[in-house]
Image: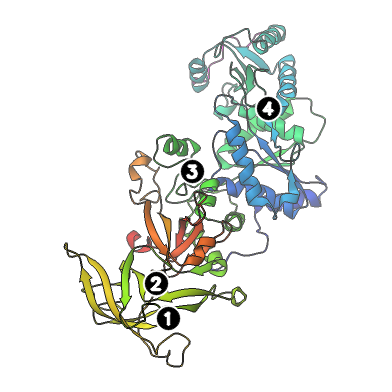
Amino acid sequence: MTPLPNEPPSDFIRDIVAEDLRTGKHTKIQTRFPPEPNGYLHIGHTKAIALNFGIAREFAGLCNVRMDDTNPEKEEVEYVNSIMADVHWLIDGWADQNLNLKAPGAPFFASDYFEPLYQFALQLVRRGKAYICDMSAEQTDEYRRIGRDSPQRDRSAEENLDLLARMKAGEFPDGTRTLRAKIDMQAPNMWMRDPVLYRIRHAVHHNTGTAWCIYPLYDFAHCLSDYLEGITHSLCTLEFEVHRPLYEWILEALDLPNELPRQIEFARLNLTYTVMSKRKLKQLVEGGFVKGWDDPRLPTISGMRRRGVTASVLRAFSYHIGITKYPSLTEVDALEHAIRAEFNQTAQRRLAVLHPLKVVLTNYPEDQTEELAATNNPEDPAAGTRKVPFSRELYIDRADFMESPVPKYFRLKPGGEVRLKYSYIIRCDEVLKDSLGNVVELRCRADLESKSGGATSNRKVKGTIHWVSARHALDAEVRLYDRLFTVPEPDAEGDFKSFLNPHSLEVVTAKCEPSLGAARPEERYQFERLAYFALDPDSHPNEPVFNRTITLRDTWAKTAK
């Protein structure tokens, strides 16, 4: 795969926007990102964020962040705050100048428009284009399915206005009445069969409190919120394509003096080996299958941030993923490639041993310590070098020793030689075991004339392994995260939870070079020969916790074959 391009992408939506500017239909472009605050954002939302803010950025326009908060029973301030944190993290320094807010740090809310939306509803009723229906939700769905008129469809405007006012005043219980658009009960598009515009909900709203007990449905609030904010291009995912006739009908049924917004649909981002539904993500969180919305195994933005994925990776991946009208499934390998491509260039190299096996260099002085020069990043000469302590007793990884080696095994084995990276060539002379036969220590001899960078360091051996000085090693909790599901499409059939990967998290106590005691949250580290890691917020001074962001190579490739 080639690196992600730097130039702005080209697609049918950008062609429409450019043409609207060229013809003078619009002189200023305004887009919006309108999440519902009923959960945390996930990587699927990064495509919408990158598209909406990307277009605003490319065409010198603005993008509103607006909470679609018309369902008080599912929405919470916690979700509003998490959404804003994710948006700022993703776009700050890239398109923050295109961010349009109600006030510094405060998004727009659909609930900001409850009064004007209610006035629009009154206008529809006066024009004979909406009526109060007394049927239950189940009856309404059934009548719409068979194309049968509501018994209240021909109520007079006066009666409808009276009932709507009484609904607003809280006179009726939940579910007893709704406001419905009067369109066409025989329409081929089910969404045009007298859809519900308002319903009664006696619930406390996170933004408006108890000021309202009737709430607009998404289709009514969406198009009119766009209109009130001056949105020019309302970009939605494909599931809203069938809603577009209703979007347009509502706007055209009202007397609106300003230019109307245009809804355009695009295919959402679907990724293998995960689920994107907020409902399913909520099941994982509330069922205890993961440890919260920011669990690094989840595709939530907060989870990926905690895992160590950078905003620049997510932004570039989402910005260049491609905008089409056709649903598709993106291989997670594409995201993983983007992560590895950036981290290979930027990550600081460090030595760490995840599964320690002790090595004693029998011919190395017991009281001696030397500092060896280690490269911080071979891809960036300006990153320089650091000093790594070396002593008689070391730790190597258990995976780098095999007592009965397989053919073409080039790591350490009885009687075999390897080079310790940045250091000496060593030969394994003796294997010590415990009473159960487990290998507990290797006694080796170092070729003290073979030090890396020395006059005789050009002596060749086939294997090079990493190590840590036992005397100087820093203990660290290391969380080895892997894919959450074992199959590419876990929600394609059956219960998606039955495909959870039982090995999606392994926790080990690693031995690390001492410089990792000063690890920083904003840095990314390659534990040499192992994987890329990031510092977790659970860390304490001299008690670091590292999360594995991604392995150096795709460990699933062989499994998939």
State how far apart marks 1 and 3 are (Cα). Answer: 47 Å
- Mark 2 or mark 3: which is in front? 2
Residue placed under numbered mark 2 in the picture: 467
Question: Which corner quadrant of the image does residue 457 belong to?
Answer: bottom left
Amino acid on which disc 2 is placed? Trp
Kindly indicate whether the residue at mark 3 contacts the one at mark 4 (C-beta within 8 angstroms): no
Q: Is residue 273 left or right of residue 133?
A: left
- The question of residue 403 being in magenta is answered with no
Q: Nearer the viewer, residue 399 or 303?
A: 399
Which numbered disc flags the more N-terminal residue, 2 or 3?
3
Q: Position of residue 6 (x, y in %)?
A: 65, 64
Magenta extent: 146-155
Q: Residue flagged by tag 3: what amino acid is it? A: Met
Label 2 vs 4, first from the N-terminus: 4
Furthest residue toward bottom: 455
Q: Earlier in the sequence, mark 1 or mark 3?
A: 3
Q: For mark 4, what is the residue?
A: 111
Location of residue 428 with respect to 164 vertically, above or below: below
Question: Magenta span: helix, strand or loop, mainly?
Answer: loop
Separation (CA) of disc 2 from disc 1: 10 Å
Marks 1 and 2: in contact by CB < 8 Å? yes
Q: CA distance from mark 2 to mark 4?
A: 58 Å
Q: Residue shown at 39%/45% (left/top)?
A: 490
Q: At which x and y percent is residue 205?
A: 62, 23
Q: Residues within 10 Å of mark 4 (few under 14, many from 20)?
A: many
- For residue 276, the mark is 3
- Amino acid identity at mark 4: Ser
Question: Which residue was labeled with disc 1?
Answer: 423
